[in-house]
Amino acid sequence: MSHEPILELTGVTAGYGPFRALFDVSLSVPEGGAVALLGANGAGKTTVARVASGLVKPLEGSVDIAGREVTGKPTYHFARSGIVHAPEGRSVFSTFTVEENLALPFGRTFSRKGVPAALERAYEIFPQLGNRRKQIAGTLSGGEQRMLCLARALVESPKLLIADELSLGLAPIIVDQVYDLLEKIREAGTAVLVVEQHVGHALDLCDHVILLTHGEISWEGPSDEARHVVASTIFGSPGTE
Ligand SMILES: Nc1ncnc2c1ncn2[C@@H]1O[C@H](COP(=O)(O)OP(=O)(O)OP(=O)(O)O)[C@@H](O)[C@H]1O
Ligand SMILES: [Mg+2]
């Protein structure tokens, strides 16, 4: 087992067209570690997630996965290196069924023979999806579409799971279930980079916190020290939820 971080960003500046969203961002996620990325709306959290999964190419700086530089490589290269990104919002193929939405990525990850077992595992995690396996994904409720994205990421047990606003639009009881699953995934050795508005959940799960402010890292430290800093910075008041 190597001691290289699974993900390392060094001096990353990135943006969209002429707009800069990140300035000189350096961060690392250790192998099997759990890092929470927090910050106000528009701070650049999703952009960090996109840089880390190869969707946005840095203008300056570098990205390393498990000690290998991958800056500027195509997105599939990041996926093959074991990075799975559960993006913000609903990202399902809306004209495909629930089952097709899962079978496609599972086939790539586990080969065709592994698909039935992976599907069973997904339906075990979210029975609601199992009941709707033949339904067209575009007609699922918002929360169900979110579950579909998550089922994929959770079953693939990558080296690093990047979860952006995991709990958005999910009922509190489902959010609790999702975080229980994330604990299990961590125990199984997957590192996680979590972007989350439910700060309490993120702090419970993660051991390290990075706070982004206007595209720059404004604070970084262990989760137990983060509670007050984060609460006052993001919400302007103490308390985490
Ligand atoms: N595709 C895009 N084109 C142009 N600007 C963008 C694009 N995506 C994001 N931005 C801008 O980049 C900045 C950072 O956005 P980002 O989505 O990374 O923030 P965030 O921290 O994830 O916010 P939120 O908590 O609202 O999800 C914002 O000012 C946003 O308007
Ligand atoms: Mg975002």
Image (cartoon, grey):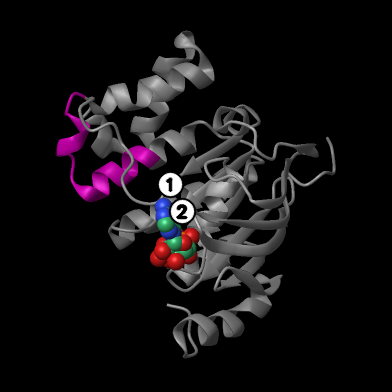
Residue located at (23% from left, 25% from top): 96
Is 103 one of the magenta-colored residues?
no
Label of residue 164 in the image: 2
Which residue is the extreme one toward the top? Answer: 113
Tell me which secondary structure the magenta stretch mostly adopts. helix
Image quadrant where residue 72 sits: top right
Label 2 beta carbon within 8 A of ligand 2:
yes
240 with respect to 76 (left or right): left
Q: Residues within 10 Å of mark 1 (few under 14, many from 20)?
A: many
Image quadrant where one finds the N terminus: top right
Q: Is residue 166 visible?
A: no
Which residue is the extreme one toward the front? Answer: 18
Image quadrant where residue 75 sits: top right
- Residues shaded magenta: 134-149
| Tag 1 near tag 2, CB within 8 Å | yes
SS state under label 2: strand
How far across and how far down the image is residue 100, in percent? 30, 21
Q: Is residue 180 visible?
A: yes
User: Which three-letter amino acid code belongs to the residue tagged 1?
Assistant: Pro
